[in-house]
Amino acid sequence: MKIQESAENYLETILVLKNRRGEVRSIDIANEMNFSRPSVSHAMKQFRENGLIVMDESGYIELTESGREIAERIYERHTLISEFLIALGVEEEIAKEDACRMEHAISEESFSKLREYWSRQKEQEPIS
């Protein structure tokens, strides 16, 4: 399923917040992303309608299997690209910002090759 970059960012944020805090509500997403509560509420409604999240009666958000797959794919891209750029000498904050833009644009083929290359490089690192 191809979804828009903003939707990928929302889903990735839900995953990160869930891992960090154990629970996620719309207000947490709004605070993390610096978005208005109405914007987040609208997005969450769309995600529920598209089967990407479920929300309980208390407002706690969980990713569905398809939502989690998208979030994990984007998060993996973000993490790997950040690590790669930092290893090249890019300042950490800049690397993370650049990775956030690149994670959405890179093709599956290019990312797969980057992942393979990075895995080989990490295997060759001397143990400290």
Image (spheres, rainbow, N blue to C red):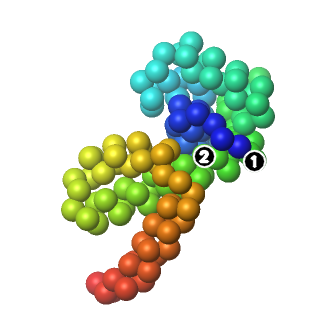
Query: Measured from the top left, where is residue 86 in percent x and y?
Result: 28, 60
Relative image position of residue 58 (x, y in whole percent): 71, 24
Q: Amino acid at mark 1?
A: Glu
Residue beneath the point at 58% across and 34% down:
4
- Chain-order first, disc 1 or disc 2: 1
| Position of residue 117 measured from the top left corner of the image (x, y, whole percent) | 44, 74
Q: Secondary structure at mark 2?
A: helix
**Visible residue check, residue 55:** no
- Which of these two is toward me, 108 or 67? 108
Camera-side residue: 18 or 104? Answer: 104
Where is the N terminus found, in terms of image quarters?
A: top right
Q: Which mark is residue 71?
A: 2
The answer to whether 123 is drawn above or below residue 38 in the figure is: below
Q: Is residue 121 positioned above or below 48 on the image?
A: below
Please give left or right for residue 128 compared with residue 104 in the image. Answer: left
Indicate which disc residue 65 carries: 1
What residue sits 55% from the left and 42% below the top? Answer: 12
Q: In which quadrant of the rendered view does residue 39 lie?
A: top right
The C terminus sits in image quarter = bottom left
Amino acid type, residue under disc 2 in the picture = Ala
Q: Is residue 26 left or right of residue 88?
A: right
Label 1: element kind: helix
The answer to whether residue 31 is above or below residue 116 is above
Q: CA distance from mark 1 to mark 2?
A: 10 Å
Say whether marks 1 and 2 touch (CB < 8 Å): no
Up the image or down, 20 lies above or below 33; here it is below
